[in-house]
Image: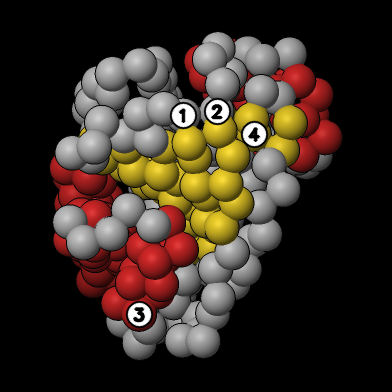
């Protein structure tokens, strides 16, 4: 019976950890997306059964533009949630000093080195100005899509791996009625009963139809 007791205790500890992680995550994922004049922003966030390390932030800037960040921390549970909180805190601090996506990624990377033992995070940072001028930098994350086509932004290494990473920036002007889509690998890694992944080709085909954000999530969920 001592084994059963230990098992039960471990179970309750795991449940407690998942609850704590959910609470941390709840604080970190914006309930309501802030309004940015001139832009329509829609988001869907659906954690799978366990608590993942996906996160996003929409930070309005004093100049009428916004910083938009989407990322994914390796691992699950409380540890991943705590890393997300470290990243989000760092992002908010850095945003007071710079709106340059590459600079922001450099700052977060410096903060994470040596703090996430063996873990890493992928992250894409996008600054969009009031007039549509957009700058994107990417640390190992899936590239955003612009109007159904993948942006040619280089991935670089994920955050927290090496101090000497250089992050490239891609700049362009988003035109009226164009759409940017940012996502995490939860979409492409949805797996059906035969063990197949939803995958990048299905996603590309879907995004070419310029679906709304709910449709993208529904498609991945219907698949698996």
- Which callout, 2 or 3, points at the residue further toward the start of the chain? 3
> Which is nearer the N-term, disc 1 or disc 4?
1
Mark 1 element type: loop
State the separation of the CA atoms marked 2 and 1.
Answer: 5 Å
Q: Residue at x 54, y 43 (%)?
A: 184
Cα distance in 3D space between marks 2 and 3: 30 Å
Asked if disc 2 and disc 1 are in contact, CB closer than 8 Å, the reply is yes
Query: Could you tell me residue 205's position as x and y percent?
Result: 80, 24
* Residue where numbered disc 2 is placed: 174
Residue holding disc 1: 132
Residue drawn at (56%, 58%) of the image: 169
What number is the disc on residue 145?
Answer: 4
- Comes first in the chain, label 2 or label 1: 1
Which of the 4 image quadrants contains residue 89?
bottom left
Residue 167 in the image, given as x and y percentages of width and height: 54, 68
Which color scheme does this rendered protein use?
Answer: secondary structure
Quadrant assignment for the C terminus: top right
Position of residue 32 in the picture relative to residue 50 (left or right)? left
- Counting from the top left corner in percent of width and height, residue 21 is at 24, 52
Residue depth check, mark 2 versus mark 4: number of the one nearer the observer:
2
**Which residue was labeled with disc 3?**
110
Front-most of residues 143 and 177: 177
């Amino acid at each position: 019976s001592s084994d059963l007791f230990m098992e039960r205790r471990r179970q309750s500890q795991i449940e407690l950890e998942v609850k704590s992680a959910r609470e941390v995550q709840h604080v970190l994922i914006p309930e309501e997306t802030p309004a940015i004049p001139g832009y329509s922003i829609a988001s869907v966030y659906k954690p799978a059964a366990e608590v993942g390390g996906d996160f996003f932030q929409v930070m309005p800037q004093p100049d009428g533009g916004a910083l938009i960040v989407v990322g994914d921390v390796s691992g699950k549970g409380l540890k991943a949630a705590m890393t997300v909180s470290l990243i989000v805190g760092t992002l908010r601090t850095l945003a007071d000093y710079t709106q340059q996506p590459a600079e922001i990624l450099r700052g977060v990377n410096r903060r994470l080195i040596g703090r996430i033992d063996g873990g890493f995070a992928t992250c894409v940072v996008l600054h969009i100005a009031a007039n549509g001028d957009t700058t994107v930098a990417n640390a190992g994350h899936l590239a955003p899509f612009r109007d159904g086509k993948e942006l040619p932004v280089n991935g670089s290494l994920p955050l927290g791996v090496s101090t000497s990473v250089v992050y490239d920036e891609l700049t362009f002007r988003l035109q009226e009625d164009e759409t940017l889509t940012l996502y995490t690998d939860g979409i492409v890694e949805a797996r059906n009963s035969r063990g197949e992944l939803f995958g990048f080709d299905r996603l590309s085909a879907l995004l070419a139809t310029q679906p709304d954000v709910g449709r993208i999530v529904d498609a991945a969920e219907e698949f698996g």
